[in-house]
Image (cartoon, rainbow, N blue to C red):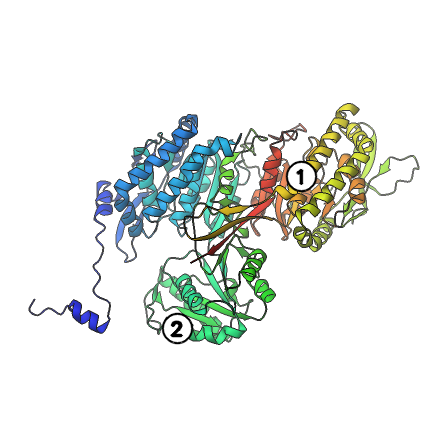
Amino acid sequence: MAGSTQKTVHEIFQSMEHGPVASPSYATAQAWLDHHSRCLGLFIDGRFVCPAERKSCSLTDSKGVSVSSTVCAADEDISQCASSAASGFKAWSALTCQQRAKVLLRLVGVIGQHGQCWSELCELCGASCSTSTLVRLLQYYSSWAQLRDVLVANWTPQGVVAVAVSNDCSLYSLLLKVIPALAMGNSVVVVPGRNSGPPALLLAQLFTAAGLPAGALSVLTGSDMSLAAKVAQNPNISYITYGGDKVDGAALCEATAGLGVPVSVSACVGATCPFVVFESADIDSAVDAALAAAFKKNREVNWVMFVQESVHDSVVARLKNRMEGLKCVALPSDQHRAAVEAAVLEAEQQGATLIQSCAAPSSGAQYPPTVLGKAAPSSPFVVNPSPGPLLPLMTFRTNAEAVTMANHSPHGHAASVWTEDLTLALETAKSLLVGSVWVNSHSVSDPCMPVTGHKDSGSCTDGGQEGLYQFLRPPSSPSPPLLRSSPVSLDYSKFGTAASPAVIPDDPDSASAPKSFSQFVGGKSGKSVSGRSVAVRAPGGGSVLAYCPDGGRKDVRNAVEAAVKVQAGWTKKTPSARAQSLYSLAKGLEAKMRDVAASISSQTGVSLDEATKETELSVGRLSDWAAYCDKIKGGNLPMPRSGSGLSLPEALGVVGVVLPDSSPLLSLVTVLGAAVATGNAVVMVPSQKYPLPALTFIQVLQSADLPAGLVSIISGSKDQLTSALATHSVIKAIWYWGSAEGCQYLQHTCTSPMKTLSLFRQRDGQGAGQGNDWTHPGILEEMWRNAVQWKTVWIPTA
């Protein structure tokens, strides 16, 4: 054409320049949005609902152009949605496993018809999730829906599950919770982020077209995460799971404390992940992967690069070469640009060297990819990185130093390890305190891979068979783990500070005084640090049976300090060695059966025959856990690509346990066996009402060959000791049987650092723990899954 300035294909080929790129039209997605008048309502009871007089939230694309608006749900919308979801659960859970699997597979066909609309809408909203990824999710979990009653026998659906994600959480992370929850027979209420809202609404519509009962999948949109807390307040909600950044997750836990609904958190956004490059790595591939991971436009995590000193210069030279010509990365706003510039300035002031692809533009929400060399582990831009295209780079000398530096972070989401030495790769993967390790690769995901956040990166597992159990109720707990309730007025700063009742000095003067028991800390029995004891009376407020130590915070600190010293070594012991220790514990209990049974009978008031029966069951339970030790294993993951995926169960660390009043001995050995068999150390608080069986059991522990400090038993005020466990930064998990106030306190408090909680509220005025049958054989599976966290290792092959 005359006067045209557009270059021909031949000219472009000669100059090797990029040709003009046509702007995508998104015609199919635009047509779907136009059908809804660019204002997407809520999806309730199998249809779109657009209530009048509601606030709306506008969604714009990467160029600032308005895509659509979504309705902000009000209280009456939440009530209507939850009621519909409860009805949908009845219809959906009443279907057979095969019928539910057929619905998920039918959706695969529906996606085939509307795949273009799905892909375009995801890209338009900045919530990328390809059609093939969605199809893979549906096919994988349709198989689990088919096999639920075969491979997950006697576990039942939770009920109505609320799935909430933050604005910056990926659509894939949302679907990794929604689809397995449906596959297990639950109904789901989705509270999506701003970008994932329109795709979630489209998915709900497509699910209905595939035959999902009305109400089984609902979508409520809003302006912020406060909507998720409001949804949790509805009594029809049985469980809520959250994905996103840790701050919003902690706020959700605090807002729902005392409601009686379990909350799990996957803090998959904003974590700091190590990218470790050893001298034995393919340097070119490692550098290319580091740039792709750190400088892509939409990323959920922040990467920190660790390079072995011997190849540092080579890596830096390749970084400079690869970064030439890289374009600036778009940032969400000018405020983000200012935060990135402040972080770079602070890094330069601390001696960091910059490697940039180009000069930063004078204005605009853009910034060039930047490597911050000579970083230190304690540098602020490493500990709390800015959300921008920044890649801190540090060096290490030895393999052990690399692991230590990589673990120097409160996060435990994922890591990437680069080496051609397979032994080194596996040793490093096992030593890193993260949930996913990618060898010579990064950001690999598949539904069969369990994703568990370690440390502050979450308290639940998504993906794989392991991720199904959060949406199921174990057979030993036929009712929900918590009783729905209303939060009580609680001063969290004063919880557990009240003085223990009936405090008396140790060593009573009278020679005929009842026996004084000792507690067990660090492998030694003795008095509490406070030197005080409390009187333990016979059932019904009768005579004083004994005096028990009144333990406190210092006792807990001493117990945790001793536990930390031995837990790592205990985890490294072979399963058979741990089994032998548990067998010896069972034999020791059998030898002390008469004394232990007598303490149960005198303390609880049951007959001696019943107490003897509980003791015999406890001996068998310890033997069961000894047999379990070498049966606990992960497996090879069925990845649909070339390579090997491994799922490995790992110990949590130090576990705090507050025991129930029911079955005081059987409950103790059950949770003790679960923790010890899986490689954990445990600090136990016996029932405040019935402490004597646990304190008598100390005699058995003294004669066992368990490492000193692996198991501690501290008696005293339940609330005071619960507070000490909750606020201790080293304790990784708490299993609690107690009051509604205690459950509320733990949910509100155990968010920094994030702890894994298993909470069971005891019925008021009764000794029985709510929902627990300690004689049920299925409790072994439940307790084992509470006692481990999962690590996935991905090793690609050519």
Report helix, strand or loop for mark 2: strand
Image coordinates for residue 383, horizontal then vertical, percent:
52, 63
Q: Can residue 166 be seen in this view?
A: yes
Q: Nearer the viewer, residue 614 or 96?
A: 96
Q: Amino acid under label 2?
A: Gln
Q: Amino acid under label 1?
A: Ala
Mark 1, residue position: 627
Q: Is residue 251 visible?
A: no
Mark 2, residue position: 356
Which residue: 56% across, 28% down? 478
Image coordinates for residue 731, horizontal then vertical, percent:
64, 50
Cβ atoms at labels 1 and 2 below 8 Å apart:
no
Q: Is residue 789 left or right of residue 99?
A: right
Name, please, the residue furthest toward the front.
798
Can you tell which mark lies on residue 319? none
Q: Nearer the viewer, residue 176 or 777?
A: 777
Image coordinates for residue 301, horizontal then vertical, percent:
45, 57
Closer to the N terminus: mark 1 or mark 2? 2
Image coordinates for residue 689, horizontal then vertical, percent:
73, 33
